[in-house]
Image: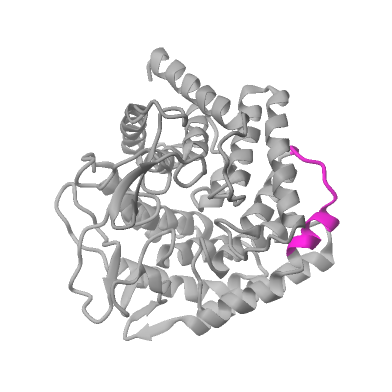
């Protein structure tokens, strides 16, 4: 990296800060990955990065907005845009010393709705990470790790085991395969199975892997985890250079019919690869580690924007999301191909800073009402808060734990 590139990154982060600190973006959503809570997370991380505690004030104002909305009855039961992502972030900020709050009263508010939230998702078999019970599981695991009360820990453990049990109940066994049906909105046909990290089998691998390191869960989790990993690895294809090893989705009535997938956090090889890498890291399984590294090195060689369906800069399906994953992988492994891929996708992302709109130069490309449009977004998944967090990551020598909320980091 040249000093010019370093300075440009710092300037971009500061430009993003200037936009987000004004709180003039009229963001109605308060969720972690889709709204104000994610903007607050950026502001707290930027304050820590710059060692300027006064920057936290803008984040504190957003947290007040979030708390006020919750006190007025906001109770969407999801991780992406609901109360469980918000609760996860409060726990993360307390863990890092950014907030000094009474855990009992704070998390008691979120935990009041746990039973009803899980019941709704269980009834609909909605395991989805962003919008279903796996996302609640990510929050519960955070609380299980950080709670100071043994009674609370027992309660979180009980609910986590309920989720594992529901995963087993919702699974479908078809010969040697085990799989789950995604949300109806994500299916082209009734038998389409999503393999990705945002909504599919990779998210299950990623979640269960995080449980294996705890004696409270290992026996219940490990056999199921191994079955899913075997299923996913059985779907590998030997594609040519520049194409994917896995499809975005697969139809289990015809597993030989496989297509290519985009290069992105949400779908395809990257989400599968990083989930397998986390599984290998947490279970200490060298055979899975080799599979993961092979998949990810193949992904690191994919450099075409068009072939890889990379149209914008955001974390969900854009250049900075790709960069963030490879940056994490390089810091974890020191494999040079991952460093090269990090630098490439960082450059591609920064080159997308071309708009004169009020979002620090970045716009999100979205398919709405049967047409592609460009939108101003400020959130983590599609907007400049996520881009800012990824840029902070790129300037840090350490692996930053905030990306646990995207199931990238596992520390």
In the orientation shown, which residue stands out farthest toward the left? 240
Residue drawn where x is 37% and y is 58% of the image = 272
Up-down relation of residue 203 to residue 171 (above or below): above
Q: Position of residue 295 (x, y in %)?
A: 30, 53
Where, by quadrant of the figure, is residue 140 drawn?
bottom right
Q: Is residue 294 visible?
A: no
In the orientation shown, which residue stands out farthest toward the top? 3
Up-down relation of residue 33 to residue 10 (above or below): below
Up-down relation of residue 26 to residue 81 (above or below): above
Residue 351 inside the magenta-drawn segment: no
Q: Position of residue 403 (x, y in %)?
A: 54, 45
Q: Is residue 22 visible?
A: yes
Q: Position of residue 296 (x, y in %)?
A: 33, 49
Residue drawn where x is 40% and y is 33% of the image = 362
Q: Nearer the viewer, residue 16 or 315?
A: 16
Q: Which residues are magenta?
A: 97-110
Judged left or right of residue 136, residue 108 is right
Residue drawn where x is 57% and y is 75% of the image = 121
Is the image coloured rainbow, by chain, by secondary structure, or in one colour? Answer: one colour
Q: Which of the image's four quarters has the N terminus?
A: top left
Judged left or right of residue 23, residue 8 is left
Q: Position of residue 126 (x, y in %)?
A: 50, 74
How many numbered discs? 0
Residue 107 inside the magenta-drawn segment: yes
Residue drawn where x is 39% and y is 50% of the image = 265
Q: Nearer the viewer, residue 379 or 250?
A: 379
């Amino acid at each position: 990296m040249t000093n010019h590139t370093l300075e440009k990154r710092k300037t971009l982060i500061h430009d993003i800060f200037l936009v987000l600190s004004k709180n003039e973006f009229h963001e109605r959503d308060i969720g972690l990955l889709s709204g104000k809570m994610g903007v607050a997370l950026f502001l707290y991380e930027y304050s820590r990065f710059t060692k300027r505690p006064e920057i936290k004030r803008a984040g504190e104002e957003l947290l007040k907005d979030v708390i006020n909305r919750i006190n007025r009855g906001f109770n969407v039961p999801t991780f992406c845009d609901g109360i469980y992502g918000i609760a996860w972030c409060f726990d993360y900020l307390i863990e890092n010393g950014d907030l000094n709050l009474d855990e009992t009263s704070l998390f008691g508010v979120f935990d009041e709705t746990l039973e009803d939230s899980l019941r709704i998702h269980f009834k609909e078999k909605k395991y989805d990470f962003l919008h279903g019970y796996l996302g609640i599981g990510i929050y519960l695991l955070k609380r299980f790790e950080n709670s100071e009360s043994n009674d609370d820990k027992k309660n979180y453990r009980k609910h986590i085991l309920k989720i594992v049990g529901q995963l087993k109940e919702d699974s479908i066994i078809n010969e040697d395969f085990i799989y789950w049906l995604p949300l109806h909105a994500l299916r082209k046909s009734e038998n389409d199975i999503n393999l990705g990290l945002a909504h599919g089998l990779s998210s299950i691998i990623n979640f269960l892997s995080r449980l294996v390191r705890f004696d409270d869960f290992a026996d219940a989790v490990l056999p199921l985890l191994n079955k899913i990993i075997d299923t996913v690895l059985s779907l590998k294809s030997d594609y040519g250079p520049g194409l994917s090893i896995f499809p975005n989705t697969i139809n289990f009535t015809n597993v030989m019919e496989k297509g290519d997938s985009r290069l992105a956090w949400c779908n395809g090889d990257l989400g599968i690869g990083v989930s397998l890498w986390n599984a290998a890291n947490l279970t200490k399984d060298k055979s899975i580690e080799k599979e993961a590294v092979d998949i990810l090195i193949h992904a690191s060689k994919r450099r075409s924007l068009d072939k890889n369906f990379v149209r914008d800069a955001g974390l969900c399906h854009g250049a900075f999301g790709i960069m963030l994953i490879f940056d994490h992988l390089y810091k974890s492994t020191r494999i040079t191909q991952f460093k090269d891929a990090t630098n490439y996708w960082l450059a591609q992302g920064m080159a997308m800073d071309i708009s004169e709109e009020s979002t620090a130069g970045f716009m999100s490309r979205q398919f709405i009402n049967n047409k592609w449009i460009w939108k101003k977004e400020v959130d983590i998944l599609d907007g400049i808060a996520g881009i800012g967090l990824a840029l902070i990551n790129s300037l840090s020598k350490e692996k930053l734990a905030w990306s646990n909320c995207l199931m990238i980091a596992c520390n």
